[in-house]
Amino acid sequence: MRLALWQTASPAGDTTAGLASLASALRTAGAAGAATLVTPEVFLPGYNHARIAALAQRRGGDWHRAAAGLCREAGCGLVLGYAERDGAAVFNAAAAFDATGAEIAHYRKIQLYGPREKALYAPGEAYATFDLDGSRAAILICYDIEFAPHVAALAAQGVRLILVPTGNMLPFTHVSTATVPAMAANHGCAIAYANCCGSEGDLTYAGGSVLAGPDGAILAIAGGAPALIIAELPATTDRARLSTQAADFRPVTAQGASR
């Protein structure tokens, strides 16, 4: 499977410009044969935009319809991070579309990061899994992927690919180079992690968008500048390199002695 990870600057609330740049990235990804393109976290209207609550749109709103149309035009799937309005609540969400523009999954971030996200968003309550080119896939968003229980739960459901819109900022560069590959290796799931770059308000994003294979191998990784990674996820992986932790795990039930 060929995947596209789009590392780009925030549109900073200019959704017309954001959709125009998304259209260009999708056309390139589609022409290169990518099954889907993953955007950064809350790409619309921008992860650190000051007016997210006011600009957030309902599922099926203008952004949703525009994204679906762009997928049809490009012949490429999409995982779009956006701010979702649902009544009085706002969610840090992502919608997955196939190459015909049909929505095939919708996810709300479970692990909200820091006081700003916790004040702004309601937390999600469920995983979202779906089929992508014959593989069982799921969406997590940014901080979610750093929680081993979530990755383990998805692996137990047969998920083999996790698509992760991300807004990871400096100084947390180790997430791309260490945490994501380790999560992939420990749970036998490929992970596609698409981050922002540049600065927005008081944040400077870390870049480092990465595709890690199910054995933890880094198949492609970006630096700190804008980039469109298009990389192949091999159809098979040497089974000798895959973790056997799920089968070998021995829970401790006895109470240890203390001093």
Image: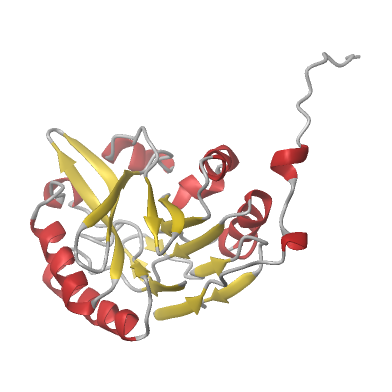
Tell me which residue sits at (16%, 43%) in the image. Answer: 85
Q: What residue lies at 8% left-to-right and 58% top-to-bottom?
A: 62
Q: Quadrant of residue 118?
A: top left
- Quarter containing the C terminus: top right
Judged from this view, the residue extending furthest toward the left is: 62
Q: Which sits in the foreground, 109 or 155?
A: 155
Image point (12%, 51%), residue name: 60
Query: Residue 6 in the image: x percent, y percent?
Result: 37, 73
Figure check: 128 above or below 188: above
Q: How is the image coloured?
A: secondary structure
Place of residue 135 in the rendered image (x, y in percent of width and height, measured from the top left):
46, 58
Where on the picture, by quarter, is residue 53?
Answer: top left
Let me know if residue 29 appears in the view: yes
| Most foreground residue, 212 or 72 | 72
Q: Is residue 221 left or right of residue 32?
A: right
Q: Is residue 250 above or below residue 190?
A: above
Q: Is residue 50 left or right of residue 31?
A: left
Say left or right for 159 vs 197.
right
Residue at the image point whose x is 49% and y is 57% from the top: 161
Q: Position of residue 68 (x, y in %)?
A: 17, 64
Q: Count up the numbered dots.
A: 0
Front position in the image: 173 or 125: 125
Which quadrant would residue 182 be assigned to in this image?
A: bottom right
Residue 80 in the image, given as x and y percentages of width and height: 28, 60
Looking at the image, can residue 225 be seen? no
